[in-house]
Amino acid sequence: MENVSFLTKNFGKYDTNAIGSYVKIGGFSALKKALDLEPLSISDLIASVKVKGRGGAEYDMYDMGRKLSQARAVKGERKVVICNADEGETTTFKDRELIKNDPFNLIEAIIIAGYVVGATDGYIYMRAEYACFRPLLLNAIRQAKSCGFLGEKILGKNFNFNIHLYSGAGAYVCGEGTALIRSIEGRAGRPRMKPPFIKQSGVFARPTCLCNVESLSIVPHLLLDEQQVYASCGMGDSIGTKMISVAGNVNRPGVFEIPFGTTVREIIYELAGGVQKNRHIRLIQFGGASGKVADESILDTPYTYEDLRAAGVMVGSGGILVIDERTSVLDFLRMNQEFFSEESCGQCTPCREGNLHIKLILDKMAEGKATAEDVKLMCKIARVMSMSSLCGLGETAQNSLLSAMEVFPETFEVGGAEA
Ligand SMILES: Cc1cc2nc3c(=O)[nH]c(=O)nc-3n(C[C@H](O)[C@H](O)[C@H](O)COP(=O)(O)O)c2cc1C
Ligand code: SF4
């Protein structure tokens, strides 16, 4: 299996508390290079290698280069770049590794994104559970400011930019852009209708460009990639590398950087060390709780956006959950559904009521009391939710259920319809 270290190449190479040690390994030379370039040539570079947003919202997946150039084109004063470090999707913990092991690269990336967009402020919105990284990031911001990489006239150029760190209070839905923005503004973290779109009216109604930690972290490395290492990795339209996290019943759960095109089998059996005690795989969920599920037949599929989609699942947040034969499909779905019943913000009816009712029907199935009519109703609720919920949470909460209905139809064979 091909070993790559593009996004992770700084890991363990410098003291994450000392900017001097980052500068020694070439840190901030991407920023220096960027400030001598036209902003749009940077977004063009990102677009040329087809970097897609790594935050997982595949339903409205944005090409990162296009996103930055569109954000630049928006008219408005005091634009904002937000780094989404909420990482609330279950089984997903790759952004944490980028923050922990390479905080200065992230700071550098946000400054470069700010320059491309024409922003004056950057916000890092970090999930409550990552509070332990607050001192690390606050120190990195403070040191970057004292070295002239943040603040007024950065590196002597006509570019002023500051970064602010915000922590969430622990709600999954606050990873959704509009909820995240309300949370920064000090309001209840509940999504709102769009339009207006974030790029036109985001934090405090200022034009805002929202990007995931991993999406941003790629940028400094790309700018210095003279050998075009990134472009030489990957398969088809999925160029480059991807940070993934593997969790569940594997021997070596963890975060790995892979070239796109690595097979699911290589990920589970080589990187993650295989299934504990060589048990059989019951199911694999891709992309966190809002992701779809597959059975073992997916093992030889290359991990690319296109191949996973063709196989009925998706890259999503980059999380991979392996469930072995000891857990039934039904119990897995009940656990997943419980998560959404808890995390729905309750603002709109399809999601608030739908998640609860699906959970009740799954529980009824577990008790052996469900009828075919119940299963039909559950399926209908799931479809209505995906079509009529206000935000991505309600639109995708039933992904695991609907995909399981296709992959494991036997799970849903229950007694005859009620009269
Ligand atoms: C319920 C919900 C939770 C989300 N959580 C996250 C998250 O934790 N991190 C993230 O980057 N994106 C999350 N997203 C996606 C963001 O709304 C947004 O698409 C993303 O931050 C944009 O960055 P990208 O284009 O770099 O992926 C979430 C979306 C929804 C609907
Ligand atoms: S879909 Fe769910 S999480 Fe999103 S606004 Fe509606 S109730 Fe809240």
Image (spheres, helix red, strand yellow):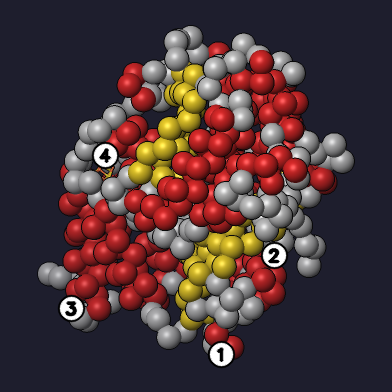
Residue 185 visible within the image = yes
Which residue is tagged 2?
Answer: 263
Which residue is tagged 1?
Answer: 277
Which residue is tagged 4?
Answer: 189
Q: Amino acid at mark 2?
A: Thr
Which residue is tagged 3?
Answer: 369
In this view, 243 is above or below 193: below
| Ligand number 2: quarter of image | top left
**Left or right: where does residue 238 sit relative to residue 207?**
right
321 or 256, nearer to the observer: 256
| Secondary structure beneath label 2 | loop
**Residue at point 56% right, 30% down?**
146
**Residue at point 53% right, 22% down?**
151
Going from the N terminus, do you reach mark 1 or mark 3 first? 1
* Picture quarter with the C terminus: bottom left
Alpha carbon separation for disc pair 3 and 4: 38 Å
Q: Quadrant of residue 226?
A: top right
